[in-house]
Amino acid sequence: MPVADAASEKLKLLLAPVRKRLKLSGYLTTVASLLWIGQAALVAMLVASLLQPELHDLSVWAAALGFLALGACRIALDTSAGRISFNAADDVISKVRAEVAQQEALRSPQCAGNENSAALASLLAEKLDSLRVYITRYQPAQVRVGIVPLVILGFALWHSWVVALILFIAGPLIPVFMILVGMAARSASEKQMQEIGSLNALLMEHLSAAVDIRALGAVERSEDAFKGAADTLRQQTMKVLGIAFLSSTVLELFAALGVAMVAVFVGFTLLGEITFGSYATQLTVYEGVFLLLLAPDYFQPLRDLAAAWHDKASAVAVAGELAEREKQELKPILGRGGAVEMPRAPAPVAWSGLHFSYGSEEPMRYQEAKVPAGTSLAIVGASGSGKSTLLALIAGLIPPSGGTLRIGEFEMTAETADQLRSNMDWVAQTPHFLAETVRRNLSLARGHIPADEIDEALQSAQANGVVERLPDGLFTRLGETGAGVSGGEARRLLLARAMLSDAGIILADEPTADLDGDTARQITESLLALKDKGATLIVATHDKALADKMDQQLVLEAQNA
């Protein structure tokens, strides 16, 4: 299926649950627009009563009250329609945002591909709002444009076939040019959406590597790269605006010509210079004023649709991005994504025939092994031998291609993964925290924890000095990447969190990598403190000193990569 067709089909699927509400909103705004016909008739009749009192007898008060009553009805209908469409838009965006977030929450970190968190955040926080404008503006305008012009054309034809002919010729020219302009608008909007995601991704990369960029003296080069990306986005945005202004100019040109021709015809007819165009008799003052008031509203729905045409292009671009995401192969973590509570206690870990393959690559095969409860295992081997992958398999973060893995009495499957994983804690090589206080980050697994337990865990992890030097101690807010503490200090905080979690199984991925000797020694002692507390400890490491302190070692061969 072509990309454009896939995007349009995806947009239809997104709107399917709220289609009835959107139609109701469109019909309400249509009725509100049609009420102008009654208001125009009252104004025309009032003008005719003032100029030709012998033909029409309508008091100013009666005309004013009728006009205000119809106006109040229009306001009430427009308000109701707006509320319905805005609620429908909120439902669509909330559903899409929840689905994408849920999908990403279940995506395996080992198989995430080239997905950038900044691009994902841009989609969820910025781009999805394009759907709101499309739903609240374009959808009602699409309903109105199919009804209101035809009704007004019928009233015009009832009074003058010439006016009807003018409107009939001028009206269809607008959609034709809108279609031509819309082709360029869709392409420009898609490129703009891509540039927004790229710029956000580039900014996130530069922020995360700010220290390295400064250390390498590449600040100026980094600034130039970012300026170039920002300038590209500026140019693309200006191109989109240019197309939007072009479509509005074309619309206003034909609308102005149509209204002007109706005004010229009515004026010369009332002056007696034109004697054709009506039926039995020439146009009266009432008919002339009535037609003049109807002519602009004949084009108004087309104007609204053209004004929202760019909104449609943006929405289609977002729908296309969502459709592309659905085509990507998703390797989810095992389980249903929800934590199921179970007693936290040391448990044995064993596997046999276990293997895993990244796509078409040669599978990584792991020799049979068993780690008794409360003991430790070091997984060692060359880079690329599959150490981190084996840890991810044990945690159920990726589904195995074959073999069995057992945690205690249960096999790791999609049905048991959540329960088994709730008894584990992960010490990552690259620490990640909530943008919260140190205390909040330490107590993630258990909620409220007494202060004496926190102090004991910090001492066991040799992290009490880290907290003491922070400006607000336990109440210091950390950045998501551990801003405010060094890499070794962040890992010690992770170990303290693991101790407070009371997890029965601790998985550590290269916990001493890139650390100086003293810090690596402190991390090693903290890990051993976890084992001494009774936890089953499994560590993937290149550090021979750390591996030698484990109860057993599993050596992975390089050919398994």
Image: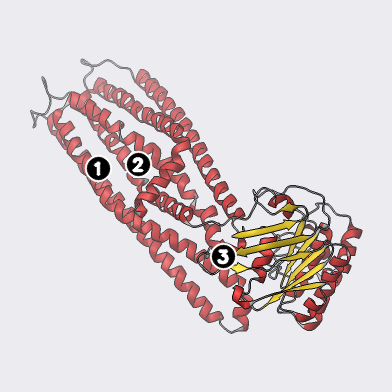
Whether residue 549 sits left or right of residue 398 in the image: it is right
Q: Which residue is mark 3?
A: 357
Q: Earlier in the sequence, mark 3 or mark 2?
A: 2
Q: Which residue is mark 1?
A: 255
- Of badges 3 and 1, nearer the viewer stands 3
- Of badges 3 and 2, nearer the viewer stands 3
Q: Residues within 10 Å of mark 3 (few under 14, many from 20)?
A: some
Element type where label 1 sits in the image: helix
Distance from disc 2 to disc 1, alpha carbons, whole Å, reads 12 Å
Q: Are marks 2 and 1 in contact (CB under 8 Å)?
A: no
Element type where label 3 sits in the image: loop
Whether residue 347 sits left or right of residue 92 in the image: it is right
Residue 26 screen position, x and y as percent: 40, 33
Residue in the picture at 50% in, 37% down: 88
Q: Amino acid at mark 2?
A: Asp
Q: Which residue is mark 2?
A: 304
Distance from disc 3 to disc 1, alpha carbons, whole Å, reads 63 Å
**Residue 87, can we see it?**
yes
Q: Earlier in the sequence, mark 3 or mark 1?
A: 1
Residue 72 screen position, x and y as percent: 44, 26
Relative depth, front residue between 329 and 132 = 329
Residue in the picture at 12% in, 25% down: 278
Q: Earlier in the sequence, mark 2 or mark 1?
A: 1
Distance from disc 3 to disc 2, alpha carbons, whole Å, reads 54 Å
Residue in the picture at 61% in, 62% down: 109
Q: Is residue 550 above or below residue 304?
A: below
